[in-house]
Image (cartoon, coloured by chain):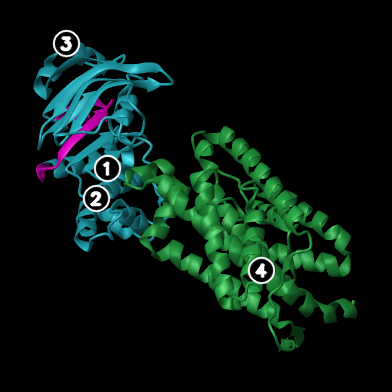
Amino acid sequence: MLDVRQLAAGYQGNDVVHDITFHVDQGEAVMIIGSNGAGKTTLFRAMCGLSEPSSGTVVFDGADVTGEPAQRIVRRGFGFVPAERHLFPRMTVQENLALGAYPERPGAETMEVVFDLFPRLAERRKQHAGTMSGGEQQMLAVGRALMSQPRLLVLDEPTTGLAPKLAHEAYEALAALRDRGLTLLVAEQQVPLAMAFSERGYVLENGVISLEGTSEELAADPRVRSAYLGLS
Amino acid sequence: MTDLLSRLPAIILDGVVLGLQFGLLAAGLTLVYGLGGVLNLAYGQMAVISAMAILFAVNAGVPILAAVVVGLITGGLLGLIFDQTLLRPIYRRQGEARVLLSLLLTLGVAFMVDGYLNWNDPTAGLTIQIGGGPIDVFGVPMRRGSIVGSAIVLAVFGLLFVFFRSTVLGRAVRSVIEDEEGARLVGIDPSHMLRIILVLSGVLAAVVAVTQSMIRPVTVTAGFSITVLALIVTVVGGLGSVSGAFLAGLILGVINTFATSEIGTFLSLIILLVAAAVTILIRPSGLLGVRE
């Protein structure tokens, strides 16, 4: 479904990530783990069209979308939830969700699906997004991305700024989406959470993919155990 | 003191009439700035060109209502031309460089337009006469032109509020003002929204020309004073906020009328600037501006 080959990207001519090759198949839940500054955000921004990759290709659903602007890629069914969320702070929960379905008027059923997944959003539908807690904003960001009924949902560090309990809840919601058959890709530095959730993963270190494998394989790898799981 | 009290209703009503004009002036400017980070210093000239188009049509024998439509179309076309030509190099820059370049380029256009119009016919001016004697409002005789002009401004603001609150397109425009990256992530093309807003801003400039000309003549040299007043109201109301422009327009309109009536015309612009400076000191983002 998503096929990234030899992608390189960075800022002002300085590549931060190099030679990134990975893929996500239909129905899979895949993680990209790495510490702060490993290049996860740079990679995701270039992949979803918020910045231009300097080389390599991104193929989504059989179409080459390399360098296509985000607003076009999104309409292909490629949902992206950035770590900073980028909600519309002075609009209500409902307005934020409605815009997620742009350019269509939002379907009532889609909104019900989101409210089922995050009952908290239903309680706060008239509240301005900017006045909500970090956890609620994360729910809203995921909900807004779901409104376009994407076939692939990509999340950059969905647990940023969340307390451990809320981070857990965030992954429970993602697991529910995975169990409904949605294809998911997450970048995460809270590795245990991501590992419990995904089937497969890649390790991003200093801008390159250093390891890949199933979650079990990665969990058993001594380097991953010491660097990301705090085990020896 | 009793004197002032007896004058107060007239001052407030005149202030509201002026304030509505101020608010409309600012609406077109504030939207373009909020959306694209582009400060259009040729905004007043867009209004003047629209006024001249109306004048031209009227002189050619076109009935006044049709001439007004010609003016509105002219304004919209000006906005579209701006978007397609002048603003292209501006959009390619980000942040401060974008604001500075937009100031320089639009100022240059403003000077050129002013120069041409002055050379062409320095005495030209648009006045739209609304016939009939004054109407009594709360005991104050008001000119019909002021009342019709104000009614048009209120109707336009009503339409703007409906557009931004209740239509998909209006919400999409707001989303770009709130968070451009967030808007792109839901599939909204910011440059498409900017084009729509520039056309809207051109039409609003033309409405300014129409309603102003019902109250006093819109002359070929009116451009800069329109832009400056629009800038002051925009800054007080908050960049990018239409409701802020409306509110700030009303407040400054009353302040300005009060100053003109009780202190003197020569100080009223200075008093407006002081009011703007005080607002910015207390609330740097304006009355209803988005906090950075």
Mark 4: amino acid: Leu
Q: Nearer the viewer, mark 2 or mark 4?
A: 4
Label 1 resides on the chain identified as A
Q: Nearer the viewer, mark 1 or mark 4?
A: 4
| Residue identified by numbered label 3 | A222
Give the image location of residue B6, x and y in percent. Answer: 84, 82
Give me the chain that's green. B
| Residue identified by numbered label 4 | B55
Residue A198 within the segment the image draws in magenta: no
Nearest the viewer among B140 and B48 is B48
Residue A185 within the segment the image draws in magenta: yes
Residue B246 in sight here: no
Do the residues bearing badges 1 and 3 touch, measured as CB atoms within 8 Å?
A: no
Side of A3 where A159 appears, left or right: right
| Residue identified by numbered label 1 | A74
| Residues behind callouts 1 and 3 on a single chain | yes
Considering the numbered disc 4 on the image, is that residue within a helix, a strand or a loop?
Answer: helix
Do the residues bearing badges 2 and 1 touch, measured as CB atoms within 8 Å?
A: yes
Tell me if mark 1 has few (under 14), some (14-19) or many (20+) residues whose alpha carbon lies within 10 angstroms of its own. Answer: many
| Residues behind callouts 2 and 1 on a single chain | yes
Mark 3: amino acid: Pro
Mark 1 or mark 3, earlier in chain: 1
Label 4 resides on the chain identified as B
